[in-house]
């Protein structure tokens, strides 16, 4: 059989499982809120056009209203000033939407400390156990934050000092961007940066370094607990919005069953 036929057979027999890493998209989906004077995105919304009625007797459809960076979404380089001359979301090559992935699990640390930051030493220790980061692949950063995704207040986890969510340190973000051959980084939180990253130097280092290096971001992922540390393949499907800085995406993982 051909390689594709082998894959179809593996899917049919569930030797390969498809795992959805996408959060359901609805009006309650948490969105990033920036302080004044910065502008903010709108929440996701549906506006009914017709539903088997006088407006359209045999069909149901809606207009959708949302921002590019709502729910599970894909960040293109042009999203950040450091990548302003890079790809918009429609220019991401299709062969980069299918890539290997590894999962670094720091959910226990994040449960103890919501401001936990991934450091270079953590990644090096993971590599010593599991092997090198994948060339042209995703680093998926598991923090357990997807368990909060249906409660916007818990998901943002803000107090008077701002949001408290786990992320990646400045030094680690720079190293991942400049010293690895990763395609990008995927997280379970509202954005690729830590909740307190507004106060880092530079602010929002994952956005600044990774997008500036032509890499990508995936956010608000779910079900990373169901993926192995190595061996998964991620399929990320953003809308090819011409001129877009990003897009809500359906993100799937292919995983071999033992």
Image: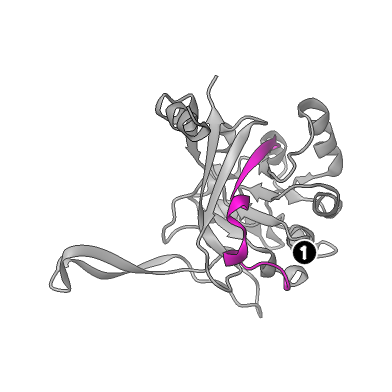
> Any magenta on residue 227?
no
Near mark 1 (Cα within 10 A), the count class, few <14, some 14-19 or many ≥20, is many
Answer whether residue 189 is visible to the viewer in this image.
no
| Along the line of sight, the residue nearer the viewer: 125 or 160 | 125
Considering only vertical position in the picture, is 124 above or below 181? above
Question: Seen in the image, is 46 located left or right of residue 137?
Answer: left
- Of 43 and 209, nearer the camera is 209
Residue 9 at x, y percent in the picture: 43, 27
Q: Looking at the image, is 128 positioned above or below residue 69?
A: above
- Which residue lies at the image location 69% right of the left edge and 46% below the top edge? 114
Q: Secondary structure at mark 1?
A: helix
Q: Within the magenta stretch, is there residue 88?
A: yes
Residue 165 appears at what percent x and percent y?
67, 51
Is residue 89 in sight in this rendering? yes
Q: Tell which residue pokes out farthest to the front in this image.
A: 1
Q: Which residue is mark 1?
A: 212
Q: Name the quadrant containing residue 198.
A: bottom right
Q: Is residue 81 above or below residue 169?
A: below
Could you tell me residue 82's position as x and y percent?
A: 77, 69
Q: Which residues are magenta?
A: 84-106
Number of on-image labels: 1
Residue 257 or residue 122, whichever sits in front: 257
Looking at the rendered image, the quarter that the C terminus falls into is: top right
Residue visible at 44% across and 26% down? 14
Residue 108 placement, left or right of 9: right
Q: What is the x, y in percent for residue 199?
A: 79, 64
Q: Residue at x 44, y 56 (%)?
A: 25
């Amino acid at each position: 059989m051909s390689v594709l036929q082998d894959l179809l057979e593996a899917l049919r027999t569930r030797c390969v499982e498809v795992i959805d890493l996408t959060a359901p998209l609805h009006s309650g989906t948490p969105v990033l809120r920036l302080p004044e004077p910065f502008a903010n995105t709108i929440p996701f919304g549906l506006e009914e056009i017709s539903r088997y009625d006088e407006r359209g007797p045999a069909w149901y459809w809606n207009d959708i209203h949302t921002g590019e960076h709502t729910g599970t979404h894909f960040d293109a380089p042009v999203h950040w000033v450091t990548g302003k001359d890079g790809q918009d979301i429609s220019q991401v090559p299709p062969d980069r939407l299918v890539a290997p992935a590894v999962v670094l699990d720091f959910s226990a640390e994040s449960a103890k400390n919501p401001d936990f930051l991934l450091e270079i030493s953590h990644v090096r220790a993971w590599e010593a156990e599991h092997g090198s980061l994948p060339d042209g692949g995703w680093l998926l950063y598991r923090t357990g934050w997807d368990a909060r995704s249906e409660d916007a207040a818990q998901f943002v986890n803000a107090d008077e000092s701002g949001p408290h969510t786990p992320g990646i340190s400045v030094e680690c973000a720079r190293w991942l961007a400049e010293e690895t051959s990763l395609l990008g980084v995927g997280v379970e939180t509202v954005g690729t940066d830590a909740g307190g990253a507004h106060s880092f130097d530079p602010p929002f280092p994952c956005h600044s370094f990774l997008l500036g290096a032509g890499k990508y971001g995936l956010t608000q992922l779910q079900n990373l607990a169901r993926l192995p540390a190595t061996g998964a393949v991620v399929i990320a499907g953003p809308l090819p919005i011409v001129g877009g800085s990003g897009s809500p995406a359906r993100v799937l993982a292919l995983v071999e069953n033992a």
